[in-house]
Amino acid sequence: MNFRLRIWRQLNLKSSGKLVDYDVENISPHTSFLEMLDVLNEKLLGRGDEPVAFDSDCREGICGTCSLTVNGEAHGPDHPGAVCELYMRRFRDGATITVEPFRVGAFPIVKDLVIDRSALDRIVQAGGFISARAGSAPEANSIPIPKHDSDLAMEAAACIGCGACAAACPNRSAMLFTAAKVSHLSLLPQGYPERDRRVLKMVQVMDAAGFGNCTNTYECEAVCPAEISASFISKLNREYARAQFRRRLGE
Amino acid sequence: MIGTLDAKIPPGPLAQKWRSHRDHMRLVNPNNRRKFDVIVVGSGLAGGSAAATLGELGYRVKCFCFQDSPRRAHSIAAQGGINAAKNYQNDGDSVYRLFHDTIKGGDFRSREANVYRLAEISNIIIDQCVAQGVPFAREYSGLLANRSFGGSQVSRTFYARGQTGQQLLLGCYQALCRQIAAGTVEMFPQTEMLDLVIVDGQAKGIITRSLRSGKIDRHAADAVVLATGGYGNVFYLSTNARGCNVTATYRAYKRGALFANPAFTQIHPTCIPVSGDYQSKLTLMSESLRNDGRVWVPKRKEDRDKPRGEIPEADRDYYLERKYPSYGNLAPRDISSRAAKEVCDEGRGVGPGGRGVYLDFADAIKRLGEDVIRERYGNLFEVYEKITGENAYKVPMRIYPAVHYTMGGLWVDYDLMSNLPGLFVIGEANFSDHGANRLGASALMQGLADGYFVLPNTLPNYLASQMGKRPPPDSAEFGEAEGCVCARIEKLLSVNGTRSVDSFHRELGLLLWDKCGMSRNEKGLREALQKIPELREQFWRDVRVLGSDQDYNQALERAGRVADFLEFAELMCIDALERDESAGGHFREEHQTPDGEALRDDERHAAVYAWEFQGDGQDPKLHREPLQFETVHLAQRSYK
């Protein structure tokens, strides 16, 4: 298969970027999208051009490192799945494919297709944890948790932290990311003691990082590689309202 | 001359060693802990849990990872589960049995005392993870569920769907985040360790490069902990993430740390087969699938291209069930991998190139229904379909072995300290617990045991004597190490040859897979030992790395790592040649039983082989640590 690629090239945050056209030929339909970019980079190197910088690591959809917008869609057309799980058989032979980084103000561009997502780490640092010191845990089966709650917590916990939710959102909101962590931990009894503090602080840091607000367009859910349900955003809102209310009551 | 190593195993009965050792180790009082700087390189299950726990204890921790966030370390990709001797299933499990399974699974090439401690700690790891909110699978009662894994006859594996590694890593990432917010841990993402600094014979710092800006920095500390994972990517194609590399441990080796058993690599039996030469990595299908999937190939070569439906039961060879009736499809990894290679070598392999065997769920679906199978393995079936375009509910999966894990690593004593005082090595990066073959669901257990519970107890034993001995980062030793790092980067950029870094890596990988992969022999290893230096020489003459060292330069990153793989590969083959026996994943064709099983030579090789660097171009020096088996009886491993 042959493709015309239009790829965003940008030297660093301060310089301006542009789309540059490249052709790749004789690509097997079983090649993954990122392997196709590897092939392009080998070709560029051969003619003395600097390869396209793009991030990836596990290449099996779990580490959340890869972060490309393909033809305007975060992670490309094959949902659910990260762009490392996208295969060229999904495209028409001869197609033109546009490749850009995730476009989110809170994720500054580092180089070409590479972005800085440390804002997501800061949201977790604000309270996305249960403060259980190593050594202080009770016997694991001393806290029975209804299977339904535990399964639901797992659904939320499956988030891979890629940031596609924010990239797909017209408001560049990271509500799905934050909601997934808040929901995971507040669905479990171990998470109850820190429930109020957690949601208030995480939302505060999320807002300060420059992410937008949720207006229920559900674009996040549509592109999420881990199929996190947007209903967790309602859960986040309920948790937030509950915490605000309890705080006003002085509890 | 061969040196002998002392693992400093505490005296006393096996079951009492860890407890009595803890009673006697030196401590650092809480007010003094903040006076100690500890460097942790790596943020996976071992490094992340160690950094978080040391932070909780009050040490000042600097944690480094090459990923853009500690949450992306490769532990995240572990699928199947984590073992613990809870015996929640009432099926006869115990600490002793987990210990025994692990020693036997490792083909009697690991230390009894370390493995017993691991089995002992396994239970509190589960407690710890549950307290952190790890959503393990549960029964309708609300109590924890278990499943079976290879190499054991009890159900002791805890799991979170097919994403156990992810959930455990997120648990320790969150604990780490808590410490970062509290200011006890300073995190350095996208920062790579390029050298270890030794001052007066002790590890006292590292030299790093920021992958983002190219900036080289010196970090001095009272102790250095390496948790940098395994070296499986030396084979180019493996189930490891693209970034996994040997650089940190290899640099430490070149500074005097001993590298133990580098030939012990694990080839995982259930991976998606290679489909083309553009491929950048292989994908694992969790071993847990062997709970319900049956492995087979056609009995006759002629049938190998027929669809499953046209091959009647009588013409199928369920070779694992046939050869190992009591473990069947759950035979350990090394044995299952070799069995797959064997049937493919006989020409009975399925799929393109004949390098594949079926993993068939038809019987399980008939017995339990598709919904149950979907609930157990749904995400794995989805991954399989994405990669191959095939629906495994309808047609059997095709699988083939691939490099997955490395049991070898830096040599450590019982306290997880290397021969260099102050250098600790934890998780996959050390060699200590899995012998010649790791059992499924034991890597997560070891990473977390080391990080949450072993290191935080043994590190103070060293630090207590180190008060006020941290050297300043402007000392001569740091200057020398930084000089070496910069010179090497400059050299990589100045070759300006014609071949890409990846092309060298791929060539090295194919060579190793052929000569030092699932089976090895003296002739092949000697050939590899001749070819590797040639390839290395060609690399330094003809590699092409474009761009600058002052910005984000992924080709330069990879070039440094591949340069280290090109040296390390030689060490692996030297070790494989020296170990003139078969043990676990190390299968020397010269040493096998009449029915093709690994044949150990306990007289000559019941020992750890640890190698000391003697200078570029020189043969490394061998040190032996004899393995003493006081509790288990050395036996020919049998899973029949």
Image: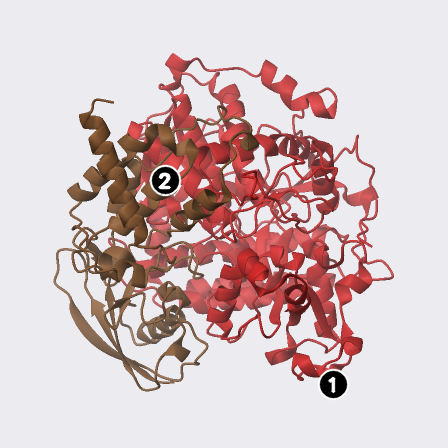
Q: Is residue A137 visible?
A: yes
Residue at 39%, 18% (x, y): give it: B33
For the residue marked with disc 1, what is the amino acid? Answer: Glu
Q: Chain of mark 1?
A: B
Q: CA distance from mark 1 to mark 2?
A: 58 Å
Q: Nearer the viewer, residue B350 or B187?
A: B350
Q: Nearer the viewer, residue B470 or A142?
A: A142
Task: Examine the image and state in which quarter residue A206 appears.
Answer: top left
Farthest residue to the right: give it: B594
Q: In the figure, the brown chain has which letter?
A: A
For the residue marked with disc 2, what is the amino acid? Answer: Ile
Residue at 59%, 67% (x, y): give it: B511
In percent of width and height, residue B78 lies at 52, 51
Q: Is residue B458 above or below residue B337?
A: above
Q: Are marks 1 and 2 on the same chain?
A: yes
Q: Is residue B334 above or below residue A78?
A: above
Q: Is residue B530 visible?
A: no
Task: Examine the image and state in which quarter residue B510 appears.
Answer: bottom right
Residue where numbered disc 1 is placed:
B302
In this image, B479 relative to B405: left or right?
left
Residue at 80%, 35% (x, y): give it: B632
Mark 1: secondary structure: helix
The shade of chain B is red
Mark 2: secondary structure: strand
Task: Examine the image and state in which quarter residue B306 appears.
Answer: bottom right
In this image, B438 relative to B562: left or right?
right
In percent of width and height, residue B6 lies at 67, 29
Residue where numbered disc 2 is placed:
B207
